[in-house]
Image (cartoon, helix red, strand yellow):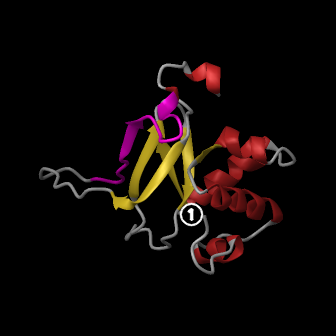
Amino acid sequence: MMHHDETPESLMLEHGIKPTANRILILRTLLAAGRPLSMTEIETELESVDKSIVSRTLSTFREHHLLHALADGESVRYEVCHCAEEEEDSDRHVHFHCEVCGRTFCIEELPVPAVKYPAGFEVESVEYMAHGVCPECRGFRGISKESIC
């Protein structure tokens, strides 16, 4: 899900990353998904790209604050960070992990709630992950995850 006028190349340049063919493919895959993807999902989508290249590219993107990494309880998932300022991360939002299908969704219209921490605590990152059943899977509540995935 690309925001207005964003291309993989422009996003990389905005974050100080040199665009290469593989980086463009990986970033395009993340943008097109419209939801956070695990490394396995990216590798499956891009079978022609070596796994080590995917891994190195995700590391590079994280180092340059182009990706957020989210732990959903099953795996680490990656989503594109549209905010180039590492000090001011204005695109943080709530995520929802479906316990039935295993997908993680962005709830972009719901920002991460502000929390006042006690004196002496220095917060470096915040994740807000809700767990439950997505609208698509709600009808499958009684069926095991393995039988529908």
Residue 45 screen position, x and y as percent: 77, 46
Image quadrant where one finds the N terminus: bottom right
Viewer-side residue, 144 vs 36: 144
Q: Which residue is mark 1?
A: 66
Residue 112 placement, left or right of 139? left
Q: Which residue is located at x 42 percent, y 65 percent?
A: 91
Check the image and name the residue furthest to the right. Answer: 48
Residue 6 screen position, x and y as percent: 63, 76
What residue span does the magenta drawing correspond to?
A: 123-139
Q: Which amino acid type is marked by label 1?
A: Leu
Check the image and name the residue furthest to the front. Answer: 139
Image quadrant where residue 33 sits:
bottom right
Image quadrant where one finds the C terminus: top right
Residue 134 in the image: above or below residue 14: above
Check the image and name the residue furthest to the bottom. Answer: 5
Viewer-side residue, 102 vs 50: 102
